[in-house]
Amino acid sequence: MNRATINLSRIAGSALMITTACSAMETVGQIRVQPLGSFLVRLELKAPNGFEDRETFTVQSREFPPCPHDATQLKHSTVVATAQYQIIIPNHARSLVGVVIEPSGSSLSKTIQAEDLLRTPMPSPSSLPEVWIMADAPRVAPPAWGALPPPQGHDHPHSGWDITNNAPDLYVFFPKASGYAKFREDFLQLTGRVPLLPLYAFGLWYSRYHPYSEDTALETIEKFRSKNIPLDVFVADTDWRVGASCGYGVNTNLFPDMRRFIQRAHDQNVYLMYNDHPEPIGKHALAPEELEFRYTGLSSLLEQGADVWWFDRNWHTHLQAPVEGLNKEVWGMRLYHDVTRANRPERRPLIMSNVDGINNGQLEYPSHPAAHRYPIWWTGDTIAEWKYLQWGVQNGVDAGIHSLLPYVHEDLGGHHDQPEAEYYTRFMQFGAFSPIARIHCTAGKNRYPWHYDATTEKIVGDFFRLRYRLLPMIYAAAYEAHRSGTPLMRRCDLEWPNRPEARDNTQYLFGDDLLIAPIIAAGATPGGAQRTVWIPDGEWSDLWTGETIEGPAAVNVEKPLNQYPLFVRRGGIIASTPQSYHTKNTSWNHIVLDAYIPSKDATNTRQLYEDDGLTTAYANHLCGITEMTLQKQKNAITLTIDPSKEFNRFPVEKRSWTLRLHLPKGQDIAEATWNWEPLPSDRYCVYEASTECPDMVFTGEHSLPPPQSGAVVELTIHDQPATNRMKWSLILSPK
């Protein structure tokens, strides 16, 4: 066995007494040390009922690879050491405060203080600390049935939840030594992964605090359809119920037959979310009668076909906290999630709740470390003012790093007030590139695109139609958020941690290859706005002008109201589909790939991810993954489409591909092959740059590149088996 080296010279006044051990855990008086892999260790104080080995509200798994370690007892302390760290525990310690953590190879040490027992934001990839501590506080152990009412025969005042064995319980990470990706992976292994949302969640949501009736709700849905504005989710705010505030009795004056309304909405290919202001009825949040009431009430609409519950924390009435420190926000997330899952165990549970730690658009404290398991989250009731739009961008970008919440989003347009056209348009454009696009407003206001002038309606509709064409890219990013925790809105220091400018939280990568720089201030002249954009390393092309910029660089960008600052990575691949207006008719049997050839040699691989879009089968790898690789070597270009042999449950048997290679400016085609066979020039089309900026981007087949671009070479291949591997190669030559 390779024993870790213990730095005894740094432990003053210690005479060896010596015992060495290599068990999975070490107990030193009232403290237990549990190494969890190479870069994570648990420090736990003995609780009233002993040390805790069960799953807790926060921690789902402590299954990590074995980590060899030594324990050495000294005169005044005991040292537990691995290759990566050593923990120095005073003998007879009765508190974690005062325990010393020493990362290997560092001259710094960390002595645990009282504040380390509290919640702290997760670190940034650009400023990784030697030590970061996650507190499982308060520590609560759930029963097997979770937040559901206890089964018959289980007589327990807290419905099987054990709230009696709380004690300081710290998980110590070493992010600087492990690197950011390993740190995040260990965190997710410990606390659970972000679930993959159903596909419809990435469509457009419409919400309004308004007493819709069955007829007016359906008329609104039909209006979206007649205007060719996509829609996937309609929201019934609190007026659906008797009294318009609390309880689960349906207001039959508005909805005479709720089951009929739900079916009629589903027939329009629209899902439904219902608002709930939960009013406690039990003496305790975990009392059986409280959980029974909540389960029965929430189930009453789910059984009729409702799709999503909106857990509205509210202020005048709200859930109780089960224990001090476990906020009502995160407790409610677990409760509504568990009830939804119990009603439809085969479907992905989806709820909406307030962000734990953001109140009415303003960040106040970090979210609970288990909150990421219960998407989606909105930032509360904001105001239609520019500063709230800026905060919305920043909250969404930062939440993906500091809380691992990839689905934080805004009331698009703001909750309060009626925005003027420029603000409304810029907010909707941001929504088109947000993880969740949900329009909302308060009573007496509206956010219908057609409420504004025809120009505003067209611009807003164009951007939401663009979002639907980009659903393959968005869904692949959502799968990556589930797999690795990488957010959909990616602050640039996730990829360029050594660039100080990359920490700017007013811009972000949306998926792998789109750089979004939202307009967050009014334009200096009507219809136009400017902002500074940091262009990362590499080549990036403005999607409207075609200008290619070599990063890193800060550039000033000016965009009229019908354009938005959008840049695409040269070397990147954007997957899209033909236009759809709801996710049930999204055509995955035709995929468009826009691949942007860089001027320098590079190889990049992207994924097309597919599944049934609704059930939990994806968790058992019942999905399809197709890798697309773009390679440039000198003047040779290759685009390879390679379906996975392991993840090969493709929803379609055959599909057509439209492949669009965006050439560097001044380049032409000397030779082309398809699957290693010569490809005649009449099999593909070459489109030269337009003389004008496009009305919209990623419009699919036959679209012209923008003015400052090179040519686009386009090839459409029809009805290929989804499992076929294909390769398109070009040899370029100067024009």
Image (cartoon, rainbow, N blue to C red):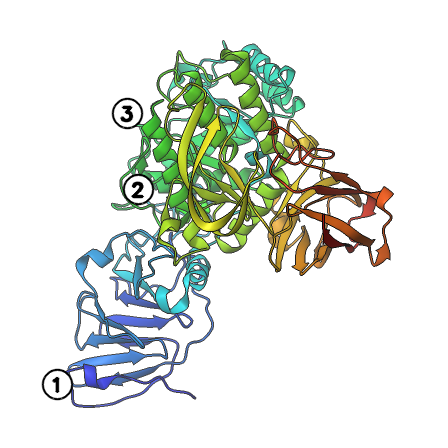
Q: Earlier in the sequence, mark 2 or mark 1?
A: 1
- Rendered location of residue 470, percent (x, y): 61, 37
Find disc 2 in the rendering and name its residue: 327
* Amino acid type, label 2: Asn
Give the residue at x 68% y 53%: 628
Q: Quadrant of residue 620?
A: bottom right
Circle 3/circle 2 CB separation < 8 Å: no
Disc 2 + disc 1, Cβ < 8 Å: no
Find the distance from the CA under tag 2 to the CA under tag 1.
45 Å
Q: Nearer the viewer, mark 2 or mark 1?
A: 1
Residue topped by disc 1: 13
Looking at marks 1 and 3 on the same chain, the residue that comes earlier in the sequence is marked by 1
Q: What's the residue at 62%, 34% (across, down)? A: 707
Between disc 3 and disc 2, whose residue precedes?
3
Residue 196 shows up from this direction: no
**Residue at figure coordinates x 28%, y 52% from the top left:** 120
For label 3, the SS is loop
Left or right of residue 593, residue 452 in this image: left
Query: Which residue, given by chain and number where applicable, does mark 3 sit on?
Result: 316
Q: Give the structural element (helix, strand or loop) at label 1.
A: loop
- Residue 581 location (% of width, % of height): 65, 26
Q: Position of residue 704 (x, y in %)?
A: 69, 33
Name the residue located 46 percent from the left edge and 38 percent from the top edge.
376
Q: Nearer the viewer, mark 1 or mark 3?
A: 1
Task: Give the crowd class for mark 2: few <14, some 14-19, many >=20 residues within 10 Å.
Answer: some
